[in-house]
Amino acid sequence: FYSNLLTSGKLNSYLADIDRQAEEMFSRLVKQMAEAEGVTEELKAANPMEWVGRMNSIRSRAMEIVNSELIYV
């Protein structure tokens, strides 16, 4: 598949499309998880360290999902 894309000159556009999809999926997942877990701007103002920890956890889980479903297929 890689060789076919490379020789046909479509590799860069394919990779750019995958990158765009991955960024959109990541952003959507982070937003959905944060809403579902109650990680809000109010929490950020009241307890910044807890907010950072919870957002880091959400981002890590979202990246795992993106990698498993889109990148490492």
Image (spheres, rainbow, N blue to C red):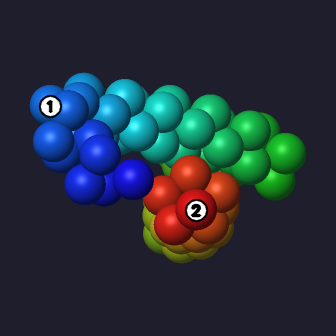
Please, what is the three-letter code of the amino acid marked with disc 1? Gly
Left or right of 33, for residue 22 = left
Using the image as rendered, state which of residue 15 and residue 37 is in the foreground.
Answer: 15
Q: Is residue 54 visible?
A: no
Compared with residue 44, is residue 53 higher up or lower down, i.e. above or below? below
Contact (Cβ within 8 Å) of mark 1 with mark 2: no
Where does residue 1 sit, x and y in percent of width and height?
Answer: 39, 53
Q: Which of 56 and 22 is in front in this view?
A: 22
Label 1: state its secondary structure. loop
Q: What x and y, as percent, mark residue 42?
A: 64, 39
Image quarter of residue 12: top left
Residue under the image location 58 percent in, 62 percent down: 73
- Decide: few, some or many residues near mark 1? Use Cα within 10 Å; few <14, some 14-19, many ≥20: few
Residue shown at 47% from the left, 42% from the top: 22
Whether residue 52 is visible: yes
Residue at 65 percent of width and 57 percent of height: 69
Q: Which residue is drawn at 74% across and 48% down?
A: 33
Foreground of the two, 33 or 45? 33
Q: Quadrant for residue 61, please give it.
A: bottom right
Labels in figure, total: 2
Q: Mark 2 points at which residue?
A: 73
What type is the residue that disc 2 sits on? Val
Callout 2 secondary element: loop
In the picture of the structure, the residue carrying the numbered disc 1 is: 9
Task: State the image coordinates of residue 64 (x, y, percent, origin top left).
Answer: 58, 69
